Image: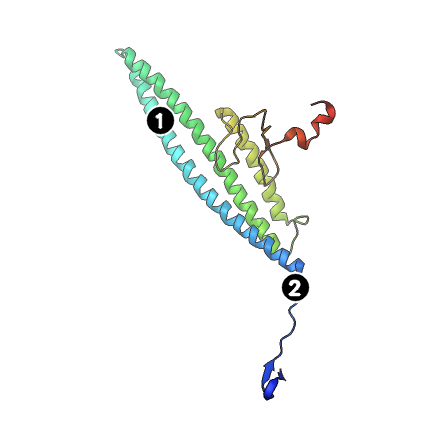
Amino acid sequence: MATSGPSGSTCPSFSPVLYDPAAAALQRAIEAARRAAIEAAERARQAAEAAAAARRKAEQSRIAAENAEKAAAARNASKTDKDNAVTLRKTATADEADAQKKESASEVANADKTLKQSKLDDLNAGRTANNPSATTVQAQAEYDAAVKTDRIANETAGDPNSPPVPAWPRYDVTAQSYQALVPGTSGTATGFAVDHKCALFGG
């Protein structure tokens, strides 16, 4: 359709474009979820590689320790042989703990990847965060369980940190940093006393 313009020229007419805030917000949310899913997939890939490398190292250390212990058990074994066996066993034990940490972190990363993708699928299907699909509910439960298992593995190893799981720094009185275990968004937070209004209770 066209309308008459100056000197008999014609100008095309256009239908007005209406801005839909809700639709725009949904598109932003979908784009953010898409980026989060891509990043989670990359973290999962990196974690799997780290876990595989750590497991290979742990296996090599185990074999070295066993061979050294066989040599140390021989009747004519020297003190050096025995000391070497003890040292290699300690190394093997540490490497095994590190491998378990990285394998646990890889499981968390995989669970997070699945959860992020499921949340993206929900948005594309028109679902809101308050109305997740059964797949997302299950993915969230598996992620939470993986995080708990990971924390136990890290405690056993004596170090709570194993990327890509959010870092857990040593507590600092000034910063009051602590680990906030929020499903899907766990991480370091600060200002515990302020957030919880501890001053009201003399804290």
The furthest residue to the left: 76
| Residue in front for this viewpoint, 62 or 40 | 40
Residue at horizontal 44 percent and vertical 43 percent from the top = 45
Q: Which residue is drawn at 62% across and 37% down?
A: 182
Residue 24, given in percent of the width and then of the height, sits at 63, 59
Q: In this view, does 63 lie to the left or right of 175?
A: left
What x and y, as percent, mark residue 31?
A: 56, 54
Q: Are marks 2 and 1 in contact (CB under 8 Å)?
A: no
Please identify, in this view, whether the residue under mark 2 or under mark 1 is nearer the observer.
2
Can the viewer see residue 149?
yes
Residue at (61%, 44%) from the top-left corner? Answer: 138
Residue for point 58% across, 44% down:
139
Residue wearing tag 1: 61
- If the image is split into quadrants, where does the C terminus sit? top right
Does residue 125 appear in this view? no
Q: How many marks?
A: 2
* Mark 2 crowdedness (10 Å alpha carbons): few <14, some 14-19, many ≥20: few
Residue at the extreme right: 200
Task: State left or right for residue 123 relative to residue 161.
Answer: right
- Residue nearest the viewer, comparing 200 with 41: 200
Q: Position of residue 157 (x, y in %)?
A: 48, 25
| Residue that carries the numbered disc 2 in the rendered image | 19
Front residue of 70 and 97: 97
Amino acid identity at mark 2? Tyr
Mark 1, Cα crowd under 10 Å, few <14 / some 14-19 / many 20+, is: many
Identify the secondary structure beneath mark 2. Answer: loop
Name the amino acid type tagged 1: Ser
